[in-house]
Amino acid sequence: MYNRIENIRDQLPEEHKDIAVLTRHIFDAFDKLIDEHRRFVGISATARVKPDPIEEKTFLDTINQMKMTILNELEKTLLDIEHEGDKNWNKIYKDGIE
């Protein structure tokens, strides 16, 4: 995922590279959240509180789905930026990208 963000950043014009940086920061925040959650589960395990495997899987799946959604939206934004001014392009975001 991080490689895809970097590839998109390289394709973006200079004035739009900040959206790739923002995406990277959001992904880093998700990773920090996962680390904090793992630490919490570990601390709870020392108190003999067993984690629910279904809840753990749901938590991680949800984070990964959110990351994929954000990455897909970044790719759609890149497409709109690349085709800016193309009269034959049907914009993905009708309200614009600026």
Image (cartoon, rainbow, N blue to C red):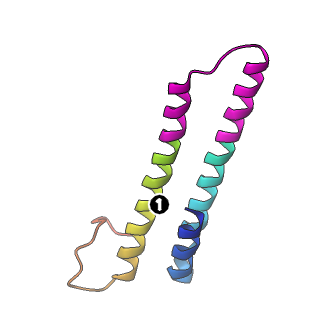
- Name the residue located 20 percent from the left edge and 84 percent from the top edge: 88
x, y percentage for residue 40?
A: 72, 27
Residue 49 inside the magenta-drawn segment: yes
User: Where does label 1 land, which residue?
Assistant: 71
Residue type indicated by callout 1: Leu
- Name the residue located 56 percent from the left edge and 82 percent from the top edge: 14
**Which image quadrant for residue 46?**
top right
**Which image quadrant for residue 43?**
top right
Q: Is residue 48 above or below residue 67?
A: above
Residue 20 visible somewhere in the drawing: yes
- Horizontal side of 45 relative to 68 (left or right) equals right
| Closer-to-camera residue (19/56) | 56
**Which image quadrant for residue 9?**
bottom right
- Name the residue located 59 percent from the left edge and 72 percent from the top edge: 6
Placement of the N terminus among the 4 image quadrants: bottom right
- Horizontal side of 42 relative to 61 (left or right) equals right
| Magenta stretch prevailing secondary structure | helix
Residue 69 inside the magenta-drawn segment: no
x, y percentage for residue 50?
A: 65, 17
Question: Mark 1 falls on what kind of element?
Answer: helix
- Name the residue located 65 percent from the left edge and 40 percent from the top edge: 33
Placement of the C terminus among the 4 image quadrants: bottom left
| Closer-to-camera residue (76/94) | 76
Q: What residue range appears in magenta?
A: 34-61
- Horizontal side of 87 relative to 40 (left or right) equals left
- Horizontal side of 21 relative to 69 (left or right) equals right
Give the mark count: 1
x, y percentage for residue 71?
A: 47, 60
